[in-house]
Image: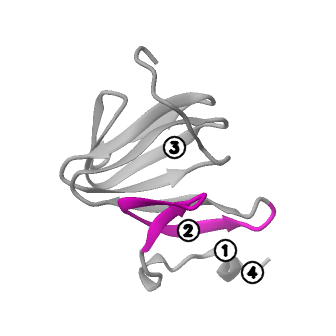
């Protein structure tokens, strides 16, 4: 095993617009840190939210981990600031909004599913 094969030089990669299933999420940029060839998707990413950007209500079939690197965001009524960590258990549901902008580190084992938001969930 060559450790160099497992290092991502994220500063050398460019931010790309977040586009999933043909939907362009305005104001959200992404950098892949760990691409999984078997599933055909990135499982560890950086997301940058511009001010007032949001990601729709969704479910995490296999859970999710979020670490706030810069700025702050609101998730399920909670405010996460720089240095905060959130573990969303499998089948957890939420949306993400950043009033002032933020950069997040995310580990997402399985692709999220966008769902219609219902009050009380």
Q: How many marks?
A: 4
Q: Earlier in the sequence, mark 2 or mark 3?
A: 2
Residue at (31, 48) in percent of width and height:
83
Pointer 3: what residue? 65
Pointer 4: what residue? 2
Pointer 2: what residue? 33
Q: Nearer the viewer, mark 3 or mark 4?
A: 3
For disc 3, the neighbor class at 10 Å (few under 14, some 14 to 19, many from 20) is some
Q: Earlier in the sequence, mark 3 or mark 4?
A: 4
Range of magenta residues: 16-38
Q: Position of residue 60 (x, y in %)?
A: 59, 37
Q: Is residue 84 visible?
A: no
For disc 2, the neighbor class at 10 Å (few under 14, some 14 to 19, many from 20) is many
- In the figure, is residue 87 to the left or right of 29? right
- In the figure, is residue 3 to the left or right of 15? right
Q: From this view, report whether residue 32 is shown above or below residue 55.
A: below
SS for dot 1: helix
Q: Earlier in the sequence, mark 1 or mark 2?
A: 1
Labels 3 & 4 near each other (Cβ < 8 A): no
- Could you give the CA–CA distance between mark 1 and mark 2, rounded to whole angstroms? 10 Å
């Amino acid at each position: 095993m060559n450790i160099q094969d497992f290092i991502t030089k994220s500063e050398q990669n460019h931010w790309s617009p977040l586009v999933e299933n043909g939907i362009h999420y305005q104001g959200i940029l992404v950098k892949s840190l760990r691409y999984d060839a078997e599933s055909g998707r990135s499982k560890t990413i950086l997301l940058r939210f511009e001010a007032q950007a949001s990601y729709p209500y969704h479910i995490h079939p296999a859970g999710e981990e979020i670490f706030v690197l810069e700025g702050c965001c609101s998730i399920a009524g909670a405010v996460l600031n720089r240095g905060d960590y959130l573990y969303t258990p499998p089948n957890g549901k939420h949306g993400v909004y950043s009033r002032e902008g933020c950069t997040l580190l995310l580990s997402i084992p399985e692709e999220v599913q966008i769902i219609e938001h219902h009050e009380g969930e």
